[in-house]
Image (cartoon, rainbow, N blue to C red):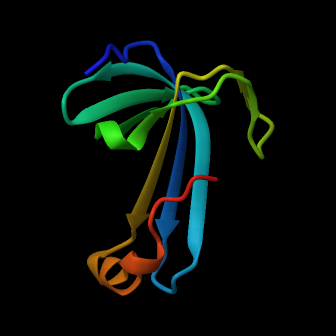
Amino acid sequence: MEDLKNKVILVSIRTILEDGTEAKEVYFGKIISYNLNTVCVTKQNNNEEITLPYFEDLFEHAEEGFYELEDGSTCENPDYIARFVKYVNEATFEKFQDCNQPTRD
């Protein structure tokens, strides 16, 4: 595992709702701590601390460049991009898991 502390990450979380629709949360954050299972991130826009699961396959190196989100927040040259899909409950997971795998958007 490489050193993640103080790295900037672009986080995308797609939440699948019971009817199959989705809610999406996207934000920049700074990694303040991590271990083999979790990463603690401080959101750039409000300093809220969020804990994310850590799997190397979910954290990809970001391409250099200027990133702008729909809310107007920006970041130049973030270190990583992490994409997650979460389901509101087990029944939703069972019903929609096959059609809602992480995407590269």
Residue pictured at 20% horizontal, 36% vertical: 37
User: In the rendered image, is residue 53 in sight?
Assistant: no
The quadrant in which the N terminus is found is top left
Determine whether, in the image, residue 74 is placed left or right of residue 1: right
- Relative to 78, does residue 11 appear above or below in the rendering? below
Residue pictured at 31% horizontal, 36% vertical: 56
Q: Where is residue 81 drawn, in percent x and y?
A: 52, 36
Determine whether, in the image, residue 37 is placed left or right of residue 52: left
Q: Where is residue 47 drawn, in percent x and y?
A: 54, 25
Q: Where is residue 86 drawn, in percent x and y?
A: 40, 62
Q: Where is residue 62 drawn, in percent x and y?
A: 57, 29
Q: Give the total number of marks visible in the rendering.
A: 0
Determine whether, in the image, residue 45 is placed left or right of residue 70: left
Judge by depth and name the residue closer to the eye, 1 or 41.
Answer: 1
Q: Quadrant of residue 87?
A: bottom left
- Relative to 48, does residue 2 appear above or below in the rendering? above
